[in-house]
Every structure is written in C-alpha cells, then in structure tokens.
Image: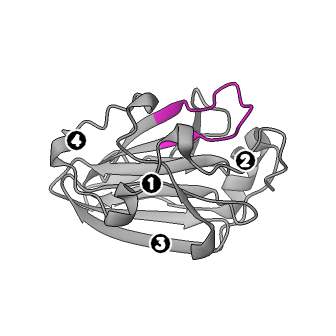
Amino acid sequence: MEVIKTALDGVLILEPRMFADARGYFFESFSQREFDAKVAPLLGHTVHFVQDNESMSSYGVMRGLHYQRMPYTQSKLVRVVQGAVLDVAVDIRRGSKTFGQHVAVELTADNHRQFFVPRGFAHGFAVLSETAVFQYKCDNFYHPEADGGINIKDESLGIDWRIPLADAILSEKDLKHSCLSDAVLDFDINDKLY
C-alpha cells in the first residue's frame, strides 16, 4: 500500500498494491497490520475501526458534509467499489491553520483509491457516475444525537463538486445544514480527539 499525504494534515490517500493477471485482479482492501505500520506513524496514533457502512447512490446524489460532535467524533476510511465519486474532507477544527480548507479526490472502482478522513473533519461526496457503491469504515459507532453537518452548497468552502448544483440530489436533512460560519463545531485544534 502506498500512502499519499494531502494538503491537510492527517487526510491521506491510500493506494493498494494490485495483483492482476488474465483472470482479473486481487488486492487487500484493508489490513490492520499494514495500516498500523504505514498510516499510524503519520497520524501519531493507532486507529481501530468498529463499524463498516455501505451506500448506493445514483448520479448527482450528494451526501454530506457530515461529522459527529464530541465525544463521538469519527475517522473514516472510504472507498468506491462500483462507479465514481468526488470525495471531500473539510477541516472543521477551530484554531487550525487549515480551518475551512478542503481536499477533494476522485475515488473510482477502477483506481481502487481509498481516502482517510480523520476526526475533526467533515466528510461528503458527489456521485459522478450513473450509480456508485460506496463503502466506509468508521472508528467510532454512529450516535444520532451527535449528528453534525455543514451545508454542501456552502460557497465559502470553494468546493468544485464537478456536477451542477442545480442537478444535485440531497436529503432533506442535508439541505437543512448550516454553512460553516454558522455550524455547531466543538472541535478545537488543541483537543485530544483520540
């Protein structure tokens, strides 16, 4: 597995080692041993995933920008097993020198890339293909009372979602999220999130 750093500290792109021949391909989609050896040193701590989720969406669906408030914050390791999405992480740690900045990466069934979104970041994606099956691992259980979100259409974030916002399909819940400037954020750059 190759680990690629991004402009946001702790947000990482993972590229698995592929084995391909005439029959098709094989790769390890996750190994705790390799994650501990290659990712944990970059983060300064280990991450143990406790929940796996999967969603299927059609073109134009946008999900996010989601996070869980303290003390139930989550890291996510996300990937696409069918189709293509633009996946985005936004720094929501008050006091961070990169507060409000984002990293976007295209995840596809063909490139097999994975995206690690640490605690203290909001996460969302837009479906670029006809359909997409999206899988992600979380290092904390879902707690509905800790739901948080930033409006995916917040222009102050400067995110090019690569689909016209007029064509975007969002849930009622996601449409009601505040912009970053008005969001309820209880993360601080000095908080111990692990």
Residue 133, horizontal then vertical, whole percent: 31, 64
Give, as a three-letter code, the residue at label 3: Asn
Residue 53: which disc? Answer: 3
In this figure, which colouring scheme has been used for the structure? Answer: one colour
Q: Earlier in the sequence, mark 4 or mark 3?
A: 3
* Of labels 3 and 2, the one closer to you: 2
Q: Is residue 19 above or below residue 171?
A: above
Res 3 → quadrant: top right
Picture quadrant of residue 160: top left
Which element type, helix, strand or loop, lies under badge 2?
Answer: loop
Residue 169 at x, y = what percent? 22, 56
Position of the C terminus by quadrant: bottom right
Which residue is depicted at the point 82% across and 44% down? 44
Q: CA distance from mark 1 to mark 4?
A: 16 Å
Q: Which residue is mark 4?
A: 165
Mark 3, Cα crowd under 10 Å, few <14 / some 14-19 / many 20+, is few
Location of mark 1 (residue): 177
Amino acid beneath label 4: Leu
Cα separation between marks 3 and 1: 22 Å
Q: Which residues are magenta?
A: 89-103
